[in-house]
Amino acid sequence: MVNKVKEKVARGEVTYGTWITMAYPEITEALSNLPFDWFVIDMEHAPLEVKDVEFLMMPLRGTNIVPIVRVPWNDFVVIKRVLDAGAQGILVPQVSTKEEAIQAVKACRYPPQGIRGVGPRRCIMYGFQSAKEYFKKANEEILVIVQIETEEGAKNVREILSVDGIDGVFIGPNDLSASLGIFQEFNNPKYIAAVEEVLKAAKEAKKIAGIMTQDPQDALDKIKKGFNFIALRHDIAYMIRGYTDAFKQLGVLK
């Protein structure tokens, strides 16, 4: 297994992805025809269970799209299950301290570096691939990204990024702004300063700097600033946008 996102980031390239929130494999199958680098399958805010995650990853086999799962919490049991189902990356929400970052890494690593139980399933194609080879490579190839969503997390970002095995950070704009007491005030100097601090720390560490974007222009602005892991919102948002634009062109909506 080779993690394409890790390779591209190491070369200094920008990667693009989107959030998958609907439990229909047709979504990931259709979108896999576009030049995405990764999908984040969202178990935190979308009503998705482990079986849904497995089904959503199946159409990605044979593509270059890296399946990443945002787990509901920093929980080693859920992390273990989605990795065994074939996830190549984990996104952990609400990480605010170095200790929480260490916990996330340990959950994704086999012993002796971590506490992941050994029982690979779909990740070794049910036994058609070598469990021993997967065991050798998984600790290095599984992508571990943590979300900076609190004022505390922004303050501790350098300590978090110093943890061996943390590949990068992802800013959750809504949660971060809420934690700062300025919900969705994205032009507020307090929010801008926090984002700049996280981005600066990720650049210095030469690790992933990710953020959610609202539209293509917002994405371009974030790339110019130095973000290299660009989320093009989520499946429902772009579906609604497409039909809204169509009705506007038809004159039905203003």
Image: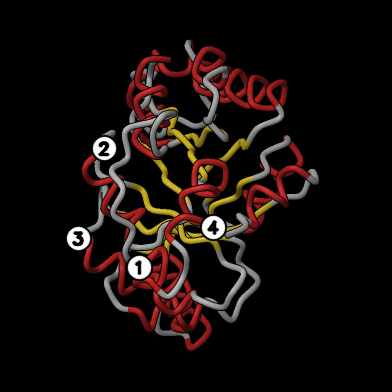
Which of the 4 quarters of the picture holds residue 221? Answer: top right
Query: From mark 4 to mark 1, how far is it between C-alphas?
Result: 28 Å
Type of the residue with mark 1: Arg
Is there a contact, CB below 8 Å, between mark 3 and mark 2?
A: no
| Precedes in sequence: disc 4 or disc 1 | 1
| Precedes in sequence: disc 2 or disc 1 | 2
Which residue occupies 52% across, 20% down?
163
| Precedes in sequence: disc 4 or disc 2 | 2
In the image, residue 25 sits, relative to residue 135, either above or below, namely: below
**28 or 164: which is nearer to us?**
164
Which residue occupies 40% across, 63% down?
123
Which residue occupies 60% across, 50% down?
230
Type of the residue with mark 4: Leu
Type of the residue with mark 2: Phe
Q: Name the residue under label 4.
A: 232
In the image, residue 200 sits, relative to residue 220, either above or below, namely: above
Q: Name the residue under label 2.
A: 76
In the image, residue 83 sits, relative to residue 76, either above or below, namely: below
- Image coords of residue 18 (percent x, y): 49, 60
Q: Is mark 4 on a helix, strand or loop?
A: strand
Q: Mark 3 points at which residue?
A: 49
Disc on res. 122: 1
Q: Quadrant of the C terminus?
A: bottom left
